[in-house]
Amino acid sequence: MEFVLLQAVFLPLLLSPVAYLIGRNYGPTYATWFTFGLLLYCSVILINAALGGTYEEHYPWTTMFGEFGFMLDGLATPFAIIIYVLCTVLALYSKPYMVHKFEELFKEHYHQNATTDGQTTAVVESVALQTYVNRQSGLYFAMFLVFAMGMLGTVLSTNLIEFYIFFEVMLIPSFFLVAFYGDGNRRRIALQFLFWTHVGAVVLLLGFLAIGLSVGSFDFVDINEAAIDPDILVVSAVAIILGLGVKLAAFVFHVWLPYAHGAAPTPISALLSPAMIGIGAYGLFRLIVEFMPQTYGDISIMLNIWGVVTMFYGGAMALMQDDFKRMLAYSSISQMGYLLFAIGSFSTYGLAGAEMMYVSHGLGKGLLFMTAGVIIVQVGTRSFSKLGGLASKMPITAVCAVIGALTIMGIPPTSGFMGEWMVFYGALETAIEEGNDLRSLMFALGLIATALTMSYILWMLKRVFFGKLPENLQNVKDGSWYMLAPMMVLAGFTIVVGIYPDIFLGHIMPYMEGVMGG
Amino acid sequence: MADFFGIPVSELNVWLIWILPFAAAMIIPAVGKFSKLSTGRVAVAFALMSAISAATLFPMALEAHEIHHQVMWIDAIGLKAGVLADPLSIIMANVVGWISFLIMVYSTGYMKGDKDITRFWFWMMFFIGSMQLIILSDNLLQVFFGWEGVGLASYALISFWYRDKKKDHVGQEGRSALGVMEYFSPTHAGMKAFIMTKVGDVMMLSGMLLLFLFAGTFGFKELVSDTAWAVEMSAQGLLVPAFVLLFGGAMGKSAQFPLNEWLLEAMTGPTAVSALIHAATMVKAGVFLVARIGPIVFALAAAGILADQFFEIIAWVGAITALLLATQGMVNPEIKKVLAYSTGSQIGYMMLALGVAGLSQHYVDGYTAGFFHLISHAMFKASLFMAAGSLLHVVGSRFMTDMGGLKKQMKKTYAFMWAAGLGLMGAPFITTGFWSKDAIFAAVYEADSSWALPLFLIAVLTAVITAFYTTRMIGMVFFGKNSKHIEKMESEGNHIHEAPRSMWIPYGILAVLTIGIGLIGLSAEEGIHHLFGEYLEHSFGIYVSHEAASTEFLGGLNPVALGASLVAFATGFGLGYIFYIGRWVDPAKFVNSNIFFYSMHKLFLNRWYLNAFVYWGFVVAPLWMARGIWRYFERTAIDTGMNIGFEKAVGWSARVVQGTQTGVSQSYLYIFGAGLLFVVLILLL
């Protein structure tokens, strides 16, 4: 097949107006299935391309920046697959959630502009509602597709400028998605989200420009550490790490995350949180670990420590939350701490484990955000203090939530464990080989942080699903199949990966060995 | 058909032992959609098939043969999955398999009519499967899968009645120690168990990873066959820490001090679950792990690498736990909790035996004693728990003070509880408990260690207490007059009756076995001793000198140990008889009679304040810290400082710039002139 990756990346962008028109003219159901079908097709060709090992496509671009290419290698494959699998299942999931949200927004909108003449009848209102929902769903799915395309493009890029463009492209639809369909003070939060991540991206761009101008090419193939002016090397490495640190929401740069992930519509939170911020980790792999192995070796211990701090900080803050989605947002910060910790481990296993962590965080946190979404739609609240005992009312959601929780906690047989043990093994390996006490301490603290993770996750399960059922929740029902089936797919996937991790490790390990051995 | 997915048919049953329960767990939810009743039948059938698969291996175990079979698992890092059926794992698999089967039969009666029965069976089968996975795995990583599996299953089953109704709580309502409530809901108890055992698991994981780092393998056989790793580790001083960390996992799962506090709250689960946790799965996993890794460490002695501290730590942890939990068992009013304390205490005995084994020249003595005690404990404790479940079922209360005088109403349970209880007490010559405990005494007494005497004294003291609390339990439940609670039930027309047949038969069988095997106890023990002797020699090269019997007389018994166990039994039983069966002295008056007894009673009842310490140190303090960071850092420095701060800074700088936009031509001209001057000056200089 030709142009596979080109299709996988650009079909969603090109067909996004079609999604808008379908939504506008035929309603959310058609738009959902169109989006789902399109993303499913793209995922299938993507996975198919990945099966054959490393796969590349190159297209001519400007002489100034170099080539426009896509590459599926051991590093990019798991990221790409997780991003598209999540996007695909979340397209289905979006339908009931977003329709619910549109109706809420309509009411808000309608009451604001309600004329006091009392002439509007129920019929007019319902027609108006229908038009509103159709229009909004068209817009939503169009932006959803662009968002998906932005994320995939970033991880497939083979050129610094291309990387940067995709990196910013994914920001635009996500900004509008939060600003249009978010909760609470959504416009302000969206702006805040855009501001912080954009500043991060610009800092990143500075690093890119420094490298590109120093090397004389922006293509990944031409970049190697030796070619970069040593004066510039450190500056650019710092710029890249800070820029990606904002994306990763590592400690101190996490300001925007709890707001953005808490306020975003849940399907988007489920993409933002596991898929998007993890791209920061992808960037660290590609740009720091692969391109600057020497510098990486020098600074890895700092990443290690930064990771542990972020793990504890996110975990401790997650304990303090009463809002379901904010708690998950803080949990994501903590999980990104694991990724940083692992990237800082400076060992093949640790790096491979970090990527497995991305995979399992994608699946596990996706599941938990989806759980939160089901509860928002079915119960109408996201405050832990108003929830409880829901396991008997929504059994399938509860089972999926528990599997998601196990994935985050790193309990076998979910994929979380496969990431976790490799991460810690990597950290220990370097600590012992270097005889570095600081690293050993970080290893021990990291393990203690897993108990913290477990505490907040189990406490969340207890407060949502167990205990006494409040009186006013007696009639709650499980979500629709649009929501449950995607969750079941992810739940199954995490267990399959947990038992048979070779699906991803088979790609990851050779790449990591190449990077660390080279 | 010579093979099945690459596994020879003759070795298939080894895999089936653990795969069958998991398979049952997978199909039970589907079966439950059609008929809830059938789920129980499926579960019992699969449990039986799994047990039979284990039994087919038995002849091989007797010949000290083993099956080791591997398949590729994670190709990318060259890890293999495998099963290892050697005498240790085969005997253990049989104990677990058959006792689990009996508990499953019992559960069909005990859980009858529960509307969440499908979930119950799912987790029970998952539990058994995980345990069998631990037993039969040939490598630590796979063991860890089972290890976390039993943790997960215990979490799910302890909080099985997740609606947190009042009747499902444990502890006395309103009771607290040092400001920490000692009254727990099922979901709280489940969380506590999961997190506390996870602390042990984390230690175990780091121990495993350390081993993997040096040995490059997780496999037990590989660890034995090439010991270069041990030399290297020992040179770096990491050998003992690594194994102690592994033992940390066993401490968590087996509820050994200081990770013992979860075990009591685990009583919120259905009693069948308690029986399974305490007799067959979960807590025995820790002992099994020590039995798995102990010989590997001991065999290193042949290579000149001594790891005495490892065994000393195991022995001391076991001894402390045995005494600590036994003392608390003396005063608790809840029947299941008394049994729970007793389990922890008895597991302490097993750890003690496995620990002192490594301190002696005759590794096999302690090893056999510990393992034999595991088997006999599995039988009588499963029986006692199931009997206690019947009592709860019939009386509807977990407090022994709500029972009393039941020996006439529940004759069968009464008889079986005596038989199993005598096993726990170690009644001389007729119970398995006596022989296994005596073997432990002998092993401790004969250990070549300066610690031998204090450990021995602790063990004997614990035996006295054990006999006492067991007598107390039986006395309080079956003797004396019916309690007010029962009288009230009777007057309301709920007649106390014997439990249904599906319930009493399983614990009857085990109670009879306790006595039956007890009668031939000495030869049974010798059989196991012989078997393990050969096993340790074949698999680990631990040579057993056959002169071991030189100090023994009276048919292979150590006179001191024998005397001690007789005295311990007589003292404990006698005291128990005085207070609770004969009821010549009122225990409440006795305790209040002087300050010493009173304060001891309070100390034991408040669990030596350990639980309170755990809560203050690991729940209250971290939450307090997190709240502090949340209020005074996240909300202020991060949220206000960075967000609002930046916003204000931008706004302020905008105003500054705005301030220069006066719109007055003169001021622009002045500034322009100043600028021009500045540029000119620079150019001139």
Image: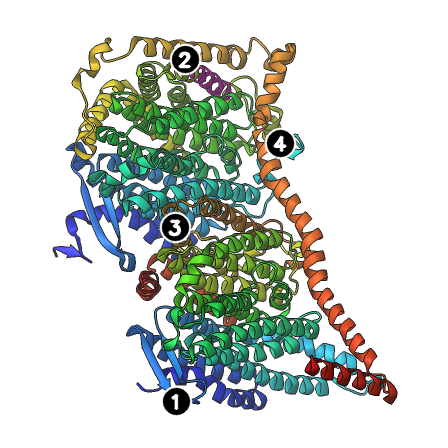
The kind of residue on which mark 4 rests is Gln
The residue marked by circle 2 belongs to what chain?
B
Give the left or right position of residue A84, taking residue B22 as reference. Answer: right
Q: Is residue B668 above or below residue B513?
A: below
- The residue that disc 4 covers is B172
Which residue sits at x=53%, y=72%?
A: A204
Across and down, in percent, residue A378 comes to 61, 66
The alpha-carbon separation of the residues under discs 4 and 2 comes to 31 Å
Q: Look at the numbered disc 2 and give the secondary structure of its residue.
A: helix
The kind of residue on which mark 2 rests is Phe
In front of the other: label 3 or label 2?
3
Which residue sits at x=53%, y=82%?
A: A29
Give the left or right position of residue A388, taking residue B655 as reference. Answer: left
Please tell me the numbered disc located at residue A60: 1
Please tell me the numbered disc located at residue B569: 2
The kind of residue on which mark 3 rests is Thr
Q: Where does the magenta region start and end?
A: B461-474
Q: Is residue A472 above or below residue A120?
A: above
For the C terminus of chain B, the quadrant is bottom right
The alpha-carbon separation of the residues under discs 3 and 4 comes to 50 Å
In front of the other: label 3 or label 4?
3
Q: Earlier in the sequence, mark 3 or mark 1?
A: 1
> Farthest left residue?
B2
- The residue that disc 3 covers is A430
